[in-house]
Image (cartoon, rainbow, N blue to C red):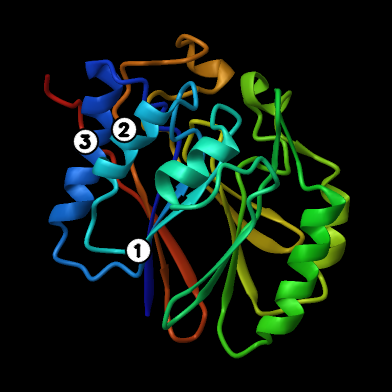
Amino acid sequence: MTVIAHVSDLHLDLPERATQRALTVMNYLRDIPGPLDAVLVSGDIADHGTADEYTQARELFDLPYPVLVLPGNHDRRGALRTGLLDGKPEDEELNQVVRTPGAVFLLCDSTIPGSDEGLLSDLTLRWLDGTLTTEGAELPVFVCFRHPPVDLHTPYVDRVRQFGEERLAAVLERYPQVVALLCGHAHVAAATTFAGLPLLVAPGVASTVPLPFEGRPAVDYELAPAPAFHVLDDRRRLVTHYRVLGQPHS
């Protein structure tokens, strides 16, 4: 069995409010008896992409499990590389392969510098295609990216989702070892399908984007933060749980 904790959209900007909400989630994950196989953070780790924000994130991500990070539209690739991945401050697309004993995670960079919209470039899609071929079918594969490639019926987010999604679908249909797609960006816990696969969206830590018929603000800073837990059993059946953690205390 493989267990993944999935969080998104911390928007760390050093002030107390964002920090406390992130601490609520990270302390909860740290205290879980576990084991967790990985913690996935699907973007917008920092709010402005500064070195200080990634220093803060690095402290928060000091967990007893592997922490997998994706860039978001508020992140800066170079600063994220140096602050969290001990890499060089390069601005090229940040695509990563992470292997655990029970699964492979392909972390695809769907960001477009200077834009809130998402796109998997031709370069990234070639990387995804080639990596899926190389990895083979021995282990289940999670394909992860920042932007959801479908409308979630939240207009605030749908206008800046991942576009050109038919190109991604054409790649995925060739690889039955892919068990699910994991993303963030929407600031809402959601579950749907894409290309015949589960598409699971992590809720936002910093804030929530309600559905339009809920009658709440377009971005709600009062609703509690939450992680998702994805559980993949030995038959490759995937179950997702969302855990609301209550309001953080100042």
Q: Residue at x 70, y 27 (%)?
A: 158
Tell me, for residue 225, which label it has, or none: 2
Mark 1, residue position: 66
Q: Quick one: SS at disc 3?
A: helix
Of the pair 173 and 70, the residue shown nearer to us: 70
**What separation in Å lies between label 2 and label 3 (alpha carbons)?**
10 Å
Query: Which callout, 2 or 3, points to the residue nearer the camera?
Result: 3
Of the pair 144 and 47, the residue shown nearer to us: 47
Q: Say left or right for 71 vs 129.
A: left
Three-letter residue code for mark 2: Pro
Q: Evaluate whether residue 159 shows in this view.
A: yes
Q: Are marks 1 and 2 in contact (CB under 8 Å)?
A: no
**What separation in Å lies between label 1 and label 2 (alpha carbons)?**
21 Å
First reached walking from the N terminus: tag 1 or tag 3: 3
Q: Residue at x 65, y 35 (%)?
A: 152
Mark 3, residue position: 23
Three-letter residue code for mark 3: Leu
The x, y position of residue 26, in whole percent, is: 24, 44
